[in-house]
Image: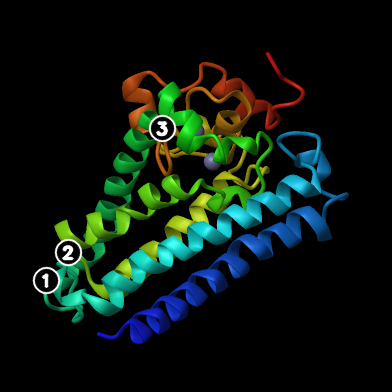
Amino acid sequence: MTLEKLLFIWMKVTQFIFIRYALVAGFTFFIFYILFRKKWQKYKLQALFPKVKSQVMEFVHSASTMALFGIMAGLIFVVYPEKTQMYMMASTHGYFWLILSFPVMLLMHDTYFYWLHRFMHLPKVFKHVHHVHHQSTNPTPLTSYSFHFLEGLLESAILPLIAFTLPVQREAFILFFLVQFMYNVYGHLGYELYPKGFHRTWIGKWVNTSVAHNMHHKFFDGNYGLYFLFWDRWMGTLDKRYDDFFDARSLSKNNR
Ligand SMILES: [Zn+2]
Ligand SMILES: [Zn+2]
């Protein structure tokens, strides 16, 4: 394959990722931070709105992350799909696996993310890699991809990790790629969408929420998960104040 062709593929895939970013992060940002900014402010987890300058920086860092994801996704989906475990026909491994592969991908990603996140909070790694993401102490949807170049690389590694170890159907994999970004945006939304009391239900105990991740951005410590709270609960890293903050649905009124 010529360099020109590789560049073309990279640009096309990055364009797709950029459109996903604009549709999911851009759209939610528009709704929550522009259109209903005043009306919904009382529901905001942190009372103040972040500065425009920090939002611009989040966008700049997100652009480099998208370019990196473009390389990774381009290599897997277009250049070397036959070298991965990915398959095209939905019936190849049966429909049961097709459905099951989805939660398996989420669990795999959550485990990878949790331990990578813990690793990135080691002081030496934090100051060189993860500090960029934590510049946003009051996150917005634009924070979702605001990573240092090295973190972007580590985060995008989940794609080859799944593609080379798990037989996944191509469209299911693409859908996972979309869902993971949507959940990432929800985590950084700055508003809680789950209903009151959700964190006390049998399912809500194990599901990560916007409150939990917002606390991580505000306090830097604890709540390392992505989709779930399994690892945080098992490893004792769930912030002890989580239930109180979720009940208050605010990190400002109940800042103990
Ligand atoms: Zn962190
Ligand atoms: Zn975050």
Q: Is residue 175 rendered to the left or right of residue 254?
A: left
Q: Tell me, yes or no, whether the two marked residues, 1 and 2, touch with CB atoms within 8 Å.
A: yes
User: Of tags 3 and 2, which is closer to the observer?
Assistant: 3
Q: Is residue 219 rendered to the left or right of residue 115?
A: right
**Residue under the image location 36 percent in, 30 percent down:** 119
* 3D distance between C-alphas at marks 3 and 2: 33 Å
Q: Is residue 157 rendered to the left or right of residue 145?
A: left
| Disc 2 secondary structure class | helix
Residue found at the very far top of the displayed protein = 256
| Disc 1 secondary structure class | loop
Q: Type of residue at label 1?
A: His
Q: Is residue 250 rendered to the left or right of residue 24?
A: right
| Disc 3 secondary structure class | helix
Residue 63's spot in the image, x, y percent?
Answer: 57, 61
User: Of tags 1 and 3, which is closer to the observer?
Assistant: 3
Q: Which residue is mark 1?
A: 93
Label 2 crowd (10 A; few <14 / some 14-19 / many >=20) = some
Indicate the quadrant where residue 173 lies: bottom left
Q: Which residue is mark 2?
A: 97
**Residue under the image location 28 percent in, 54 percent down:** 105
Q: Which mark is residue 120?
A: 3
Q: Type of residue at label 2?
A: Trp
The quarter in which the C terminus is drawn is top right
Q: Is mark 3 within 8 Å of ligand 1?
A: yes
Q: Is residue 8 above or below residue 85?
A: below
